[in-house]
Amino acid sequence: MPRTDKITSSTRRRILTEAALLFRRHGYRGTSTRQIAEAVGVKQPSLFHHFANKQSILEELLAISLDPSLAEAREAVTAEGPVARRLYDYVLWDLTTLHRLPFALSGIYAHDVLQEPALAPWGAKLEALYAALRDLIGQGVRSGEFRPVAPGLGQAMVAGVTLSHIDYAAGHTGGDPDELGAAGAAFILGGLMRDPEALDRLVADAGPRAGAPPAGAGPHRRAGGDGPGGASVPSGRARSA
Amino acid sequence: MPRTDKITSSTRRRILTEAALLFRRHGYRGTSTRQIAEAVGVKQPSLFHHFANKQSILEELLAISLDPSLAEAREAVTAEGPVARRLYDYVLWDLTTLHRLPFALSGIYAHDVLQEPALAPWGAKLEALYAALRDLIGQGVRSGEFRPVAPGLGQAMVAGVTLSHIDYAAGHTGGDPDELGAAGAAFILGGLMRDPEALDRLVADAGPRAGAPPAGAGPHRRAGGDGPGGASVPSGRARSA
DNA sequence: GTCTATAGACTGATAGAC
DNA sequence: GTCTATCAGTCTATAGAC
């Protein structure tokens, strides 16, 4: 079954793009269907030929971004290896992927929107993603890799950083997804991990950065030598397991 | 001129409390004045005896939380000492203070709400707070205390963690403000700092603020990156654009 | 200080011509 | 697939009695 119908209509695609931008700027509830229609260049009732209702626009944007993240997070919970490694890989993958999406998503993850009863299934999916993060953080605290922190608080902070990234991306086009993702992953793991040198090793193994031959498990931090600008990571990696 | 009128009426206070809770749950725009009135136990038009309009309720909540934070952040920018110390102290103070406030504030810092033209002055204040954070982060990157990161991205992540805290607090009453604040400050500085041992020292010295360091505490390098030179760490790897 | 009643504007969505 | 016209519901805020 071809699942390409979603993108057949160019108008449909434009609705998604413009709606995402408006949701970011004015919020989901603060954006009227008339505003969306005007941005697309049609009259308001024409929207309802492409989407059943306003909520369907939001739901399609949610499906694009949330479903893959949830699957990846769940995989990280049960995968093998140190939890710091698994969480780092997940966050790096998640942020890099989000930074590559062609939609401004920061308006659709507002806490209040996903709590609307009509969006309960999506709220449940986000809650499942958060539960996976709490699980990972709890693992790390128990194993001693992470500093002690309430898993719920750690999860909230990780989610906060993720949301800050999708908002930052929408306001700063042209950034390198790999670089942004690496910065976010380093921030989060640095915030959680007890041993910072172990973080350096995580980063070093994540992908060869230009001009910085890894000094192995060196005694001191590898004075990171990413050259000006260009440091790009081949996007092949990222998936654990 | 007594300025105590703000709290004289118990009803006025209850409006603030209930409105904050509803703003968190349904968002500012998703909360109707009828809902607020019902939560308070009066009819909708009675609200307008205590507040000129719905927006005034939001503005009073903003004033309570945003004004002090902005003042403190600006002070941190120009204060003396290592920037890691100043940022740590600011974040610790900010989070602890926010956790002590008797209002659920996470609904009023949604990006879209503060972008409303009618709230432009408050949007400008928040932007000024963010500018101070960018300044601090830039200082830390240049001095070598922080890992290289685009100041705008670092600021976004710090703000994201802060927002996650006020949301966490609203959902988990009874937590110790000092403990939560310390966890958040450690997370943020751990995410930013290059040398984790220096973070341990920050946390250990957290109590006395600016000027009364315990005498025998730090035999290690104490005056590291302070001063205009920023001579502490090799200053290579400037970040591109 | 709270109430009833209501104004005035905007909302999402539908009907039906082309 | 887009349009015009329009409905029915909801919103904030005001007027004025008590």
Image (cartoon, coloured by chain):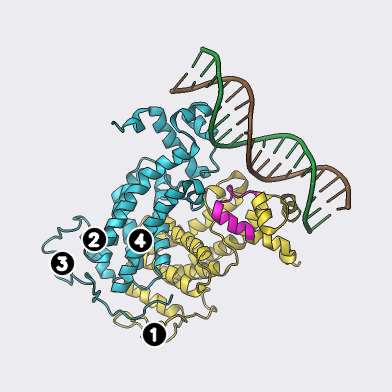
Chain colours: A yellow, B cyan, C brown, D green
Find disc 1 in the rendering and name its residue.
A214
Q: Earlier along the polypeptide chain: callout 2 or callout 4?
A: 2
Residue drawn at x 21%, y 63% as measured from the top left: B80
Say which element carries label 1: loop
**Type of amino acid at the residue the image marks with label 3:** Gly
Q: Which residues are magenta?
A: A18-32
In the rendered view, would you say A48 is above or below A236?
Answer: above
Say which element carries label 4: helix
- Image marks 4 and 1: residues in contact by CB distance under 8 Å: no
Query: What whole-number distance in Å separates the C-alpha atoms at marks 2 and 1?
Result: 38 Å
Mark 1 Cα shell of 10 Å, populated few (<14), some (14-19), many (≥20): some
What subunit carries mark 1? A
Closer to us: mark 2 or mark 1?
2
**Type of amino acid at the residue the image marks with label 4:** Leu
Say which element carries label 2: loop
Find disc 2 in the rendering and name its residue.
B79
Q: Nearer the viewer, residue C18 or B177?
A: C18
Q: Is residue A126 left or right of residue B208?
A: right
Query: What whole-number distance in Å separates the C-alpha atoms at marks 2 and 4?
Result: 13 Å
Residue A3 in the image, given as x and y percentages of width and height: 73, 66
Mark 4 Cα shell of 10 Å, populated few (<14), some (14-19), many (≥20): many
Tag on residue B133? 4
Q: Earlier along the polypeptide chain: callout 2 or callout 3?
A: 2
